[in-house]
Image (spheres, grey):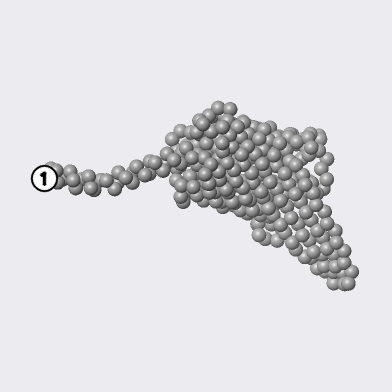
Amino acid sequence: MKTAKFLGVLVATLAPWAHAQEVAVTTAEARDVSNGRDFASVNGQYGAGLSFRPEQTGRIYGEVGFYTRSYTQAAGGSSVDFSRTYVSWLLGGGYKLSPEVELELMLPMAFAGSSTTVTSGAVGGDQSDSGVAVGNLHVGVNWLKAAGAVRMKLGAALEYGPWTSNPSGISLAALAFGSIVRAQHELGLWLPERFSIVTPSRVEFGNDFIVSADFALGLHLSTEGADSEISVQLDPGVGYYVSRDALVGVRLPIVAVPTGGSGDNAQIALEPFVRVGIGDGFLNLRLTMNLDEPSGFAFDEGGIWGVHIGGGGSF
């Protein structure tokens, strides 16, 4: 009788704990197989929507970046009003050649608009210009590997667009700001008249709390006889799943161009982000704040920032 009573108390005590463990395991399993949860990446370009599920065939994604600035310079009774707007977007997708190998394509595009108004007494004049440019096509292969709480994406890609040859001034500005608002990253996508070999990769550790690093080396060969450039990117970051489908985090994008000659050839930025899963898709929002020269501080006069909104889905 005492034994039966003891077992009843023991079952009553352990039942809530066992249920909690079951829920935790079920949630973890659901996270591991749900689209967009295998890589806790900031956006599709860095791996969001890429799953280890053997039944996944592919994914698509896109993101738009935005920066604008208006200011006035006045002297001697005259004033000049400047307005600049830059919008750049990236469309991409991947197709699984096998559960561990993905073929990936990306195409960047950009818009630049500028207006200048000069006022001197009762006399004034306006000048404006705008244009759209297409960056370099990215064709790459990603190798995927997961071991416990560690997930890796190792990539190799070629980036080139013959249509970038001899760009106009406004097209050159549009492409340049496509990289600048992204903390000077992905030079191979945005630099005109370049053939690039790059290694976009990612490693991350954790389930609910994620520690990660995006990294890439780039060799950018001129198609017009100019000097070649080498770029090095390293973006450490952390993220936390506040719910099954909501990820918040922050990254520290760092890029250096050691072949850039004299001047400041490195850029450091801070990038908080949010990503929310919706069914087989996701939405992402991030803010890039350049911290130091040449493009920072982001919100000082002459500083540059970028707001990015994107999303994607898998099939």
Q: Establish if 209 lies above or below 301.
A: above
Q: Amino acid at mark 1?
A: Lys
Q: Nearer the viewer, residue 61 or 278?
A: 278
Horizontally, is 236 left or right of 163 in the view?
Answer: left
Q: Establish if 233 lies above or below 127.
A: above
State the residue at coordinates (68%, 46%): 89
User: How far from the left and from the top, in percent, is residue 43?
Assistant: 59, 44
State the residue at coordinates (64%, 32%): 140
* Element on which disc 1 rests: helix
Q: Nearer the viewer, residue 25 or 160?
A: 25
User: How far from the left and from the top, in percent, is residue 5?
Assistant: 14, 46
Q: Which quarter of the figure is the C terminus placed in? A: top right
Residue occupied by mark 1: 2
Q: Quadrant location of residue 58?
A: top right
User: How far from the left and from the top, in percent, is residue 60?
Assistant: 61, 39
Q: Is residue 155 visible?
A: no
State the residue at coordinates (62%, 42%): 61
Q: Nearer the viewer, residue 254 or 127?
A: 127
State the residue at coordinates (44%, 45%): 208
